[in-house]
Image (tube, rainbow, N blue to C red):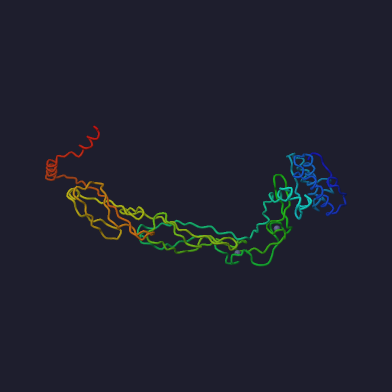
Amino acid sequence: MAENHDFYEVLGVNRKASADEIRKAYKRLARKYHPDVNPGDKSAEERFKRISEAYDVLSDPKKRQMYDRQGFYGDAARAGQAGGGARWQPVDFSGFDFSDFMGGEEQASRGGGGFRDIFSQMFGGRSDVREDQPTSGSDLEYHVNIGFWEAIRGTTVRLNIMHYRACANCNGKGVTGGEITCPECKGSGNVSKAMANMRFNVTCPRCHGRGKIQNPCPRCGGEGRTSEPEQIEVRIPAGVQDGFRVRVAAKGNAGTHGGHRGDLYIVTKVSPHPFFERKGDDIHTTIPVTITEAALGAKVEVPTIDGNRALLKIPPGTASGQRFRLREKGVTSLKTGQRGDQYVEVRVHVPRVADERSKELLRELAHLNPENPRAEVYRQVQG
Ligand SMILES: [Zn+2]
Ligand SMILES: [Zn+2]
């Protein structure tokens, strides 16, 4: 970059050379000095840089005019002054047949990893991908709170969701007929692309070099879908648990350009109940009993989720914390249709006695039953 080379000299053309002559000269020289056909050759690389720089200016009528007038071109001069290492100027490869470099298709394929490969890697093969291709819409997930009883009996939830729907203006197509100048390349059919510290002009990926695109729908901006609110009703089946996912087909996001529509998932959050504790399809409860009931045995009424009371028989000598099962008094399973069980834990309620008569009776009871309940514990500790 240090020396200022004459661009006409670099390309080996005279000052009156036509655009076509400049282009041909550039192609010939670029083929000869490209770094990829001269690996590791610093002077060839330097030469290629100068060729590219010269061609960038001389191939552009405005830049060429400026260069002819002042003897240098602005960008190149600044890059040289700044001394910020190699700054390669834009190179126009649009419309190039890269097989020219290798002298034909057979040679390119025989060489393995020739120009064609290098350039398709550089530009990511993106020009093959059409921008207006349909893409699938995503699934959506909404969390809803439902009551304890609603989860057991089933319910219908109404919710307002926001999702992409196919654009009503263009029916999801994204275009409304007619053509406009491509906004990406301003109609030129080429755009500038950066790769390492090189810039290349490549075929515009938006219009594929046509310079025009189909008129995008003004409502959806060409996407074919718009974000819309929708009020929906979802039936929550009886027996759902906390974290259950209800799938609502095709109520997720619409894809772009009429692509497949995603699903909506409703995830249930079930409120707890102060008495009934739900564990899967089983119900867990704790019921207080008196000392007398626990000691003598009794039939106690236990509330169930059916809204009535089941009769639980506790045997004589029932301990606090002992657990009983009421068969098929749990929740009807969503999967099997079978009911779970209800577990009842007994908690012995100890009375606070204040009157002398009650105290006397309890002392008498203790006298009649001198057995020490801690004896077993002491034996174990002595072991
Ligand atoms: Zn374009
Ligand atoms: Zn539209």
Relative to residue 1, is residue 280 drawn left or right?
left
Relative to residue 112, is residue 350 drawn left or right?
left
Please state the horizontal and vertical placement of residue 110, each as a whole percent of the image. 74, 49
Please state the horizontal and vertical placement of residue 21, each as a whole percent of the image. 85, 53
Q: Total label count?
A: 0
Residue at image x 47%, y 57%? 142
Relative to residue 120, is residue 343 drawn left or right?
left
Quarter of the image where one finds residue 137:
bottom right
Quarter of the image where one finds residue 206:
bottom right
252 w.r.t. 318: above or below: below
Residue at image x 53%, y 57%? 138
Ligand 1 quarter of the rendering: bottom right
Please state the horizontal and vertical placement of residue 383, each as a whole percent of the image. 24, 32
Quarter that holds the N terminus? top right
Please state the horizontal and vertical placement of residue 17, each as a whole percent of the image. 86, 52
Relative to residue 189, is residue 146 drawn left or right?
left
259 w.r.t. 353: above or below: below
Residue at image x 30%, y 60%? 306
